[in-house]
Image (tube, coloured by chain):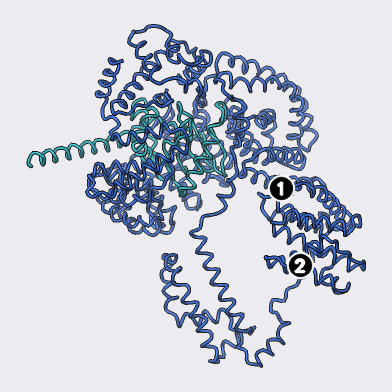
Amino acid sequence: QIHFVLLVSRQGKVRLTKWYSPYTQKERSKVIRELSGVILNRGPKLCNFVEWRGYKVVYKRYASLYFCMCIDAEDNELEVLEIIHHYVEILDRYFGSVCELDLIFNFHKAYYILDELLIAGEIQESSKKTVARIISAQDQMVEAAKEEAGSISYIIAQAS
Amino acid sequence: MEQLKTIGRELAMGSQGGFGQSKEFLDLVKSIGEARSKAEEDRIVLSEIDILKRKLLEPDIPKRKMKEYIIRLVYIEMLGHDASFAYIHAVKMSHDDNLLLKRTGYLAVTLFLNEDHDLIILIVNTIQKDLRSDNYLVVCAALNAICRLINEETIPAVLPQVVDLLNHHKEAVRKKAIMALHRFHRKSPSSVSHLISNFRKRLCDNDPGVMGATLCPLFDLITEDVASYKDLVSSFVSILKQVTERRLPKSYDYHQMPAPFIQIKLLKIMALLGSGDKSASEIMYMVLGDLFKKCDSSTNIGNAILYECIRSISCIIPSPKLLEAAADAISKFLKSDSHNLKYMGIDGLGRLIKISPDIAEQHQLAVIDCLEDPDDTLKRKTFELLYKMTKSSNVEVIVDRMIDYMISINDNHYKTEIASRCVELAEQFAPSNQWFIQIMNKVFEHAGDLVNIKVAHNLMRLIAEGFGEDDDDADSKLRLSAVESYLQIMSEPKLPSLFLQVISWVLGEYGTADGKYSASYISGKLCDVADAYSSDETVKGYAVSALMKIYAFEIASGRKVDVLPECQSLIEELLASHSTDLQQRAYELQALLALDARAVESILPLDASCEDIEVDKDLSFLNGYIQQAIESGAQPYISERERSGMLETTDYHSQDHHEVPSHALRFEAYERPKPSSLRTQASTELVPLPEPSYYSEAHQPISTSSVSERESSEIKLRLDGVKQKWGRPSYQSSTSASSTPPQAANGTSSHPDVGVGSSSLKPRSSYESKKPEIYPEKQRLAASLFGGSSSSRSDRKSSSGGHKPAKGTASKPPKENPIPVQPPPDLLDFGEPTATSVTATDPFKELEGLMDSSSQDGGSTDVMGVLYSDAAPVTTTTSVDSLLSELSDSSKGNPGTYQSQTSKGPNSQEALEKDALVRQMGVNPTSQNPTLFKDLLG
């Protein structure tokens, strides 16, 4: 089970956090501080895993962004590494060559996508296509809602 | 320049959507992005919080605006600040009918609130309504929220609807409903225990996504109760078989592997079901064997499945053939260059070694390489393996290594773990008492504050009881050696409290036992301890008690006791101590000094720490005293059962408690004091009424004062319980307070300001050049680690040892060769682009340069030069090369500049678009960090 997901930049800036186990705000900042200290200082050829407080943190670097997931000691690290990659591929497909800037300004969308991939720390859907389908359905709904709202306000504006 | 801007703008117009946020938000993000320190960032966020607080107070905020405020709040929380002042607005937004707003509301709520937050109760209603919605997307949003927010108390409110949704026509809804039920099961198994058949049913769902999701709850259920699911073994096996035969839709393929995540989940379940069950295991042999053949070990996901197979095989009752296949896979992992795979190999070895202990032998050199690897993670994993393969023949080498490592690290959490492992191994396999005490001393000296207090008690007991059953001589030798080593260590500064307690206790019991050390010498030492650690009351207590024992033994043996002046002053100081415990000990000591030898001997007999002390539970020696008290008018004791039995008939409130156990937490806190006051009342009131039954049951009449004392202590206890419920566990905060990154040492030293190529090369090459020197040493280590107790095995080993160096040198050249050219293409790691060279460049110059060259249509090959014009040429080329080599993933080819141009071209174009968009919004990302624009995926 995944306990939290963390996206941190090379400079140690937080780009996205998702907590599946309860942590207080104070604990969260501590966790982030501690982990980014450990992970950002690791050399490039080393393992993508870190043992930490009895858990394991699997991380992977993409360009200047680190994707980290904290898992139980008994979980399969290589699998989690691929879950991370899976997530990045979905992001890439959604944003079209995703870059860090996309995630900074559209972090809520990154959250929506993550919510389709993982629920309560378990992998929920492993088909890229299915995730993409439901996300685009949501986007279309949103677009439709926007249009609707637009047209109503247009009518109101004309009437008054 | 002008032209560039217009082009950028046009591109931005063309790209749909844009970032869709207002300028204020973009400004916020940008200014935080440019903050140079955490303090500056905090300042920006705090002022943003002020702004938002003010804005949220305004009346009639348009919804669109509100949505953005909420997104900004999410951002603030993400950065670690408190946005609780606005939680209620997020809750409100989830009520909205507009899906866009609702979704934002739900997102914010799930990120803000924990399941025990008070506001949850306000959302339940909305969730109920949304679960009934015609729009499946609304239902999905609600189910997402359920998984995060519903707690034990609110499960019943949504459970029926969630169960209905298991048959929804949309697979996305069914899947989420399953996950929600899984969540409920985790929260409160009893709430869904009647619904478990649904999970079995959903396993046969037409949609593979739903089936895959169902495996999560089934895994949990099977973990809890294997026996009830044995009938599913063949189903799981056949599902796995179908998956591996690519019967699932192509969209579930991942890197050419059919539905690997589902395969892994199935393997995990099979491991549970096959554990200790021969017939179940046999059903699995076929499919597991096939998996070993089918898995592509060149991809990471293939290895993930292979590793899971190894794990399954180590859990079930395997066939020899499977074991062989697993061993092969492990040796492939261990031989790999990738640290990740080595790590998995070591882990797999640790699992398989339980079944076939001989397997480690052929990998001994690989294991030792891992043990000496600069990578801490790998090292720790290897220690775990060593821990698993420790036996009495190699315990000394292994524990010594562990202790050396323990001393070298700062990570308290791991230090604790490795210390307790050392203790465990030492207790289990210690070859001699001397060695054991030495090891324990080291553990206590370096990790004394971290080990469990039980370890200290065990050590004291061990010294007191001795190893040998009859051999008193050996025992006293053991004690003497302990005393000697402690006297030596004591003078060192800053010893951990627990260690000092052990030292004091042992010195008190046995310091003078042998006659080697005089009482005044030992008592002087003990006074020094009490003096040096005057803030530690526990240590002082131990020291004073030890002093008391020393003096008692002196008095009992008829010698005259000279209390040293410093001891005298210590006693006097403690007589006035604020700690009642210390005070009492001091008074006792003082009283003891005035007694005669016979009395002292019966109070503190020599070496009697192991004698059982008989406790008279009935306190029968008080009978006379009580009789006297009752005769003079005191009330008899009423047993606790008697008292509470009365309560139940007289007190309504307590009955109410019993009826609503699930809400007990909420109400108990307020109502507790009442019944307890009633209770004492009742007891005093009811006492005069003589009931025959309770005289017969009350064996021990005790005065009422003690009754009320009991009462008060009971009440106190309850309050403690309540406190614990809410209080933060202090354990977590204390353990990691001082822990600094353990990797800091090798991390910083290995790559200061150098580029990737050279930095990754350096430690490696130095390591390699050292290798031949270490070699014999390593072999010796291998021999001591892996050498079995049987001589035949050591023979075999020495002969294989002859081969090994040759093998090692043979494998060296291919290792060394590729390095100078470029780091070998590695699927798992992305190289480290030079921080210095990149930050020095202006992002715009870089982009402009790119724009020019790409408009020149296949122009100069000198793109890189333009790109990093500001930076030193040498480092940049290496960094770009290495980056590209990794970006182009598996292509092993030479990353020529042409190739680099083509792969770089479109990306930068897109980066340009994004940049233009940002500019159009009026936000100039003058950040020093052009990597923001870099594609995450190559």
Q: Is residue A136 left or right of residue B623?
A: left
Marks 1 and 2 sit apart, C-alpha to C-alpha, by 34 Å
Q: Badge 1: how crowded within 10 Å, few (<14), some, or many (20+)? A: many
Which chain is tinted cyan?
A
Which chain's residue wears label 2?
Answer: B
Q: Which sits in the foreground, B862 or B394?
A: B862
- Residue B355, can we see it? no
Q: Which residue is mark 2?
A: B586
Mark 2 falls on what kind of element? Answer: helix
User: Residue B671's spot in the image, x, y percent?
Assistant: 44, 72
Q: Amino acid at mark 2?
A: Ala
Which residue reaches farthest left? Answer: A159
User: Residue B243's spot in the image, x, y percent?
Assistant: 42, 34
Residue B111 versus residue B722 in the image, above or below? above
Which chain is tinted blue?
B
| Mark in front: 1 vs 2 | 2
> Residue B668 lies in what quarter of the image?
bottom left
Of callouts 1 and 2, the N-terminal one: 1
Label ID, residue B63: none
Which chain's residue wears label 1?
Answer: B
Residue B137 versus residue B478 in the image, above or below? above
Q: Residue at x 48, y 49 (%)?
A: B222
Q: Amino acid at mark 1?
A: Val
Residue B836 versus residue A56 in the image, above or below? above
Q: Which residue is mark 1?
A: B423
Q: Quadrant of the N terminus of chain B?
A: top left
Q: Badge 2: how crowded within 10 Å, few (<14), some, or many (20+)? A: many
User: Residue B812's spot in the image, x, y percent?
Assistant: 66, 18
Q: Quadrant of the C terminus of chain B?
A: top left
User: Residue B376's spot in the image, x, y percent?
Assistant: 62, 34
